[in-house]
Amino acid sequence: MNDAIRISSPADILGFIPHALGFVPRESFVFLTLRENALGATLRVDAPTVGAPTGFAASMVDYLAVDTQATAVLLAVYTAEAPAAGAPRPFHDHVEAVIDALEGAGTPLKDAWLVTPDHWQNLLCDNDAGCCPPEPLESITDGHLNAEMVFRGSSYQDQPGTTYPPFTGRADTAERIRQALPGVLAGELHTGRELWAEALTRGGRTDPKTTVELLACFQRPDLRDVLFCNVIDPDRPDAEGSGDLLTGTGITPDWDRVDRAQETARALIGAAPEGYRAPLLTLIGWLAYLKGQSSVAADHFTAAVTDTPGYRLAELMEQLVNRGTIAPVAQDQNTAHKRNR
């Protein structure tokens, strides 16, 4: 079966971006590399507000150089700053610097678009010439590609950020988790691993007793770490020497299993009182990092630290992402996650 999705218009490309990122960007530059006629990597950065345009452009070229197979680049600029008649396009100097820098790097900017809350239009043509009239946003959301992605089960948030509803479960849930902790702390690792493996086959559907036991399992750091590892390596008995796995080096994930793990973690978050969600938020963020979704990852790490101040694993992963590190697994087209599977 051929799972490739045909992209035949700018609206299709703009329809693909939220699915690739997991959310609709705001005040962002989104770069997509092209490998001849196929899309490659997707990079989102905050729209520049300070700093020299040449420095910003040089940083973007460095990031995009990770895709060594890229032959050209596409750019979508998302901003609420609508272009005034006769005025330069938003971020004019930065866009010009990006054009020059990409040309010098041998991966020229093939096309670019401006997306505002009201419309989208080509960013490179001359507004005064009337050759790039504004297009309605509905042409993106109602397009063939967006419909195909939704049909295949892909979805995205309407805006950036990570929000989960407040806990509305049983009032004694926190106490039940605490009561389960002594057994988890005294138990063997394989017991928690078996619970987790079974949960991943059920897509997050667990009975209340198992849910509480799993929430308790994730509170034990050494067991938490091996449960993380078991998403990628189901047979791994412990997390000893798992640094490469954590950073996404030398691994070939079963991405369907990764998706199930994120789905299961989200279900467990819904059953967890505040103060018990940090391990699950960190898990979702780490798996997003492996997928190359750095913005989603960073939001989850921040949420984890908010839930449990000083949560060390989330703090370390947040530092990794904030340095602009891209997981090696996401850099290789043979191992990278593909949302159109």
Image (cartoon, helix red, strand yellow):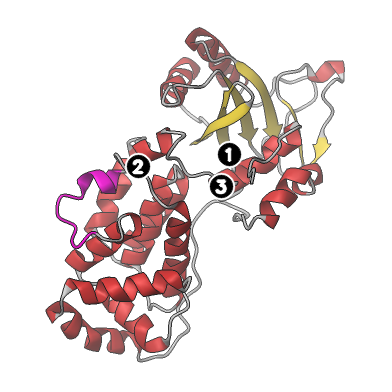
**Label 3 Cα neighbours within 10 Å, binned few <14 / some 14-19 / many ≥20:** some
Residue 118 picture location, percent across and down = 76, 43
Lower sequence index among marks 3 and 1 = 1
Residue 125 picture location, percent across and down = 76, 18
Does residue 98 sit above or below 119 in this rendering?
A: above
Q: Report the Cα–Cα distance between label 3 and label 2.
A: 21 Å
Task: Let me know if residue 53 is in the magenta part.
Answer: no
Residue 200 picture location, percent across and down = 41, 69
Q: Which of these two is toward me, 59 or 104?
A: 104
Lower sequence index among marks 3 and 2 = 2
**Mark in front: 2 vs 1:** 2
Q: Which mark is residue 321?
A: 2
Badge 2 amino acid: Val
Badge 3 amino acid: Arg
Residue 188 lies left or right of residue 64; in this view the side is: left
Residue that appears at 59% across and 52% down: 159
Residue that appears at 38% across and 39% down: 329
* Quadrant of the image occupied by residue 265: bottom left
Badge 1 amino acid: Glu
Residue 185 lies left or right of residue 216; in this view the side is: left
**Mark in front: 3 vs 2:** 3
Residue that appears at 21% across and 68% down: 223
Does residue 174 sit above or below 223 in this rendering?
A: below
Residue indicated by mark 3: 339
Residue indicated by mark 1: 27
Does residue 71 sit above or below 238 in this rendering?
A: above
Decide if residue 303 is in sight here.
no
Q: Report the Cα–Cα distance between label 3 and label 1.
A: 23 Å
What range is drawn magenta here? 236-247
Q: Mark 3 near mark 2, Cβ–Cβ under 8 Å?
A: no
